[in-house]
Amino acid sequence: MKLQVEQAKEHIGKKFPYSYTIPTSELGDVTAFPWSRHDITINGEFWFDGQNYIVQGSIESKGDYDCSRCLNTTEHNRKDSFEEIFSERRDAADDVTPFDGEEIDLTELIRDTLIINEPSQVLCQDDCKGLCVHCGANLNVSPCSCESFVVDPRFAELRALLDEKDDRLS
């Protein structure tokens, strides 16, 4: 995923669009991530501002994730955006990425953006009921037959005191 930038230098401020659909294998070894088995699409634009090249874009990807509540596999679509400044100058500021002046390689930027924005929680549906904490039944499929109110053993003594108090008041 390389952007040829010679033409942008001749037209300061003019935006040049780009679009790629690639297999994730082009990003290196990313097999540990759920999106690694699907192609990704990158769209955006770049321009030369007179000193630096500005690259903006978005990455569309999807992956097979485990639901954080019920553990069912669910396909999750993602759209992540990025913006980076590139310069031919080797003495550029810390927030500017140096490059050779002919082409900008987006591979590392795309890989890093996908990894940094990896979702910490994915749900199969917004109202996923999850699993029963006692028997492990998927509550989206059907309710389980466990007692709805089970006292945590650490609070059993407190529960006994409350029950004793209720008995005295009756």
Image: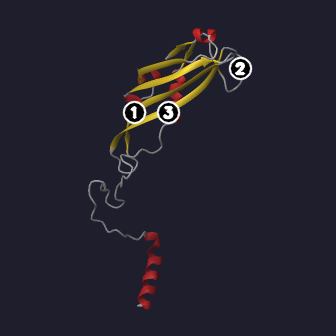
- Which three-letter amino acid code belongs to the residue tagged 1? Lys
Marks 1/2: CA distance? 35 Å
Looking at the image, is mark 1 or mark 2 earlier in the sequence? 1
Marks 3/2: CA distance? 26 Å
Q: Are marks 1 and 2 in contact (CB under 8 Å)?
A: no
Residue position for label 2: 92
Determine crowd level at label 3: few under 14, some 14-19, many 20+ residues with C-alpha closer than 10 A: some
Please tell me whether mark 2 sits on a helix, a strand or a loop.
loop
**In the rendering, at what x and y percent does residue 126 appear?**
39, 49
Does 132 sit left or right of 48 as displayed?
A: left
Marks 1/3: CA distance? 11 Å
Q: Give the quarter of the figure containing the C terminus.
A: bottom left
Q: Which numbered tag is attached to residue 37?
A: none
Residue position for label 3: 80
Looking at the image, is mark 1 or mark 3 earlier in the sequence? 1
Q: Which numbered tag is attached to residue 62?
A: 1
**In the rendering, at what x and y percent does residue 167 appear?**
41, 88
Quadrant position of residue 8 = top right
Tell me: residue 155, above or below residue 7: below
Quadrant position of residue 122 = top left
